[in-house]
Amino acid sequence: MNIAQALAEAKSVLVASLSEDQASLESQVLLASLLGKPRSWLFAHPEHDIGAVEAQFRVMVGRRFTGEPLEYITGRVEFYGLALAVSPAVLVPRPETEILVEASLEALASHVSPLVADVGTGSGAIALAIAAQRPDARIVATDLSLPALAVAAHNMQQLSLQEHVDLVCCDLLSAVAARFQLIAANLPYVASGEMDSDSQTVARFEPHLALDGGPDGLAQVRRLLPVARDHLLPGGMLLAEIGAMQGKAAVSLALSFYRDADVSVLRDLAGLDRVLRVRFSS
């Protein structure tokens, strides 16, 4: 079987659950990943025989057909210009989380050598994206999952950012004594009742620890809020990713703890709630 035939076969399988264009694209991504080549190479070598990896490619296509995230199958994802390794031990970093990174960089713009906490780091995406943009920053990245921290450690080493990020295994900030200019958190925010819905097929593959946000999706934010101020320097800020319809509830929750704080919600280009911002006075 050559490349052209393999791609046509894969597309015919994946189109049952994806659009035609998406099925074609993902077929190319899977085969390029397997061959260790860029997608452009596939187009330049349509007659190249893949006999040695044909069976393996069919297994990969089968995994994708069942709904397994493409990123778990290839083992990598692009996030904020970084190539990151991912596995079922971590949540696949989402494009919308880049809004949290942008907000973090904006909050740090006026600080020299800032101290930053990334709570619930998972693959290390947020911490490493900030470190890559702000090499003067010192970042403490925490996670409750040792397997997740192993993925983060691998990414940190691959990107040569180990001098800028410290990984700590703990619940929220329970093992951290430092105080920071910024706390960035991407904690679970899917409501428990939505975990098994058709729109949450990722829940079959991604770690529940990184997804399940309790009855209203805000259980972990509710736990982080009361301890955040004690871990922030005067004038510090908390940024927490939230669900698309959770803004009003998240603001109310934050104000129930901190009536004197400047609390707002950052939205994406579609106008959906994405980040809870809590700014404390100096």
Image (cartoon, grey):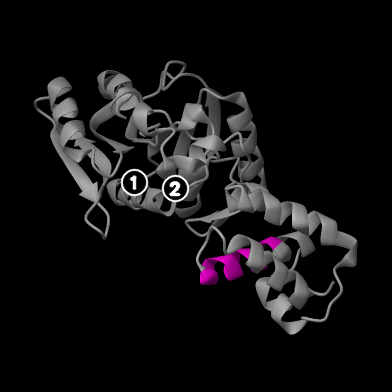
Residue 257 vs 141, above or below: the answer is above
Q: Which one is in front, 101 or 68? A: 68
Is 29 part of what is drawn in magenta?
yes
Badge 2 amino acid: Ile
Q: Quadrant of the C terminus?
A: top left
* Residue occupied by mark 1: 104
Q: Residue 58, image x and y in percent?
A: 76, 57
> Residue at horizontal 35%, vertical 23%?
214
Q: State how far apart marks 2 and 1 are (Cα).
A: 8 Å
Q: Is the residue marked by circle 2 packed among few (<14), some (14-19), or many (20+) residues within 10 Å?
A: many
Q: Which one is in front, 229 or 115? A: 229
Can residue 206 be seen by looking at this rendering?
A: no
Q: Main secondary structure of the magenta part?
A: helix
User: Which range is magenta?
Assistant: 20-30
User: Could you tell me which secondary element the residue under label 2 belongs to?
Assistant: helix
* Residue occupied by mark 2: 130
Callouts 2 and 1 close, C-beta under 8 Å = yes
User: Could you tell me which secondary element the residue under label 1 belongs to?
Assistant: helix
Residue 148 vs 275, above or below: the answer is above
Is 56 part of what is drawn in magenta?
no
Badge 1 amino acid: Ser
Which residue is most to the top?
A: 174
> Residue at horizontal 13%, vertical 22%?
256
Q: Is residue 58 left or right of residue 200?
A: right
